[in-house]
Amino acid sequence: MIDNKINKEFVKDYFIKLQTDILNAVEIVDGKNFLVDSWQRPEGGGGTTCILENGNIFERAGIGFSHVIGSQLPKSATDVHPEIVDSKWEAMGVSLVFHPQNPYIPTVHMNVRFFLANKNNKLTWWFGGGMDLTPYYGFTEDAIHFHKTIKTALTPFGTNLYSEFKKKCDKYFFLNHRNEPRGIGGIFFDDFNMKDFNFSFDFTKEVGDTFLKAYLPILQKRRKQKFTNKEKEFQQYRRGRYVEFNLLQDRGTLFGIQSKGRVESILMSMPPSVKWEYDYEPEKGSKEEELYSKFLIAKNWV
């Protein structure tokens, strides 16, 4: 959308506060503090990457804020938006991925972002983001809670938005080369500029503010569940799917690399330990097989 009635400073202030609020909540839950690493980008802008590793709950938890500025858009952006070739641009957002120690706690991803391009003094902008859940051992009540919390938050903005963005999430977080979903989904939206700036910004804020409500109850329910070495190995095997998706398909990773972003921050979403096993097949009737048969399928959870 082309619109001059925007306030990018409001967006930036919200994103910084969101990062801080989630960081504080996670530190309370885990009991260990994040490493805070601020950085500058030579072409313009910078950010703050917050990393917690070898915590009591999380093997790795990363929460990044970035606000980067450029004069030449990477191909991954202009392929979708040829109208902004040769535009000056800004991109800002918060992105997080949490990889728990316990395989009964799912990995979670959340992202909210704002993009602004200026070509011949005309501003083109949109919001994007979403969140999705990647369990290793599935629990129906957890999947329902995650999706129901998101749906409840989004419904005031439009009764069809949850179902529309759930479908986009299921389509986006799908490993084409494996012909399987990455997890049980959530929502995904991009190029979002519905109605006007204020409406679109309020919607994006609601997504960001809903994250802790959607994820923390699941974490608290599963954090004390006992697990075996076999279950830990299955978690590491399934983490391989996360790596494959991020490196082969994720548009955010591709945009970051092509725009000469900070590699350490771009790849903070990677799990700290992972394994690949040749031609793995879960045992019939096992909890591992149940993940494939009952959870890694297209399904309406609410």
Image: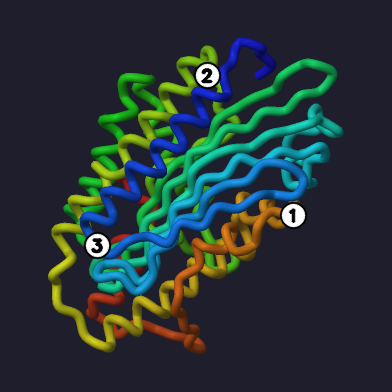
Q: CA distance from mark 1 to mark 3?
A: 33 Å
Q: Residues within 10 Å of mark 2 (few under 14, many from 20)?
A: some
Q: Residues within 10 Å of mark 3 (few under 14, many from 20)?
A: few
Please, what is the three-letter code of the amino acid marked with disc 3?
Answer: Asp
Q: CA distance from mark 2 to mark 1?
A: 30 Å
Determine the residue located farthest toward the top in the rendered image: 5
The residue carrying mark 1 is 260
Residue 13 coordinates in the image, percent (x, y): 47, 30
Residue 1 visible to an observer of this rendering: yes
Which residue is at a point 23% across and 51% down the rendered structure image? 216
Residue 30: numbered disc: 3
Determine which quarter of the picture holds residue 50: bottom left
Q: Residues within 10 Å of mark 1 (few under 14, many from 20)?
A: few
The residue carrying mark 2 is 194
Badge nearest the viewer, 2 or 1: 1
Element under disc 3? helix
Element under disc 2? loop
| Disc nearer the start of the sequence (2/3) | 3
In the picture shown, does residue 239 fall above or below 159? below
**163 with respect to 118 (left or right):** left
Report the label total.
3
Report the quarter where the C terminus lies: top left
Residue 5 coordinates in the image, percent (x, y): 61, 10
Residue 296 visible to an observer of this rendering: no
Please, what is the three-letter code of the amino acid marked with disc 1?
Answer: Lys
Which residue is at a point 42% across and 53% down the rendered structure image? 109
In the picture shown, does residue 266 fall above or below 20? below
Please, what is the three-letter code of the amino acid marked with disc 2?
Answer: Met
Badge nearest the viewer, 2 or 3: 3
**219 with respect to 98 (left or right):** left
Residue 172 coordinates in the image, percent (x, y): 53, 49
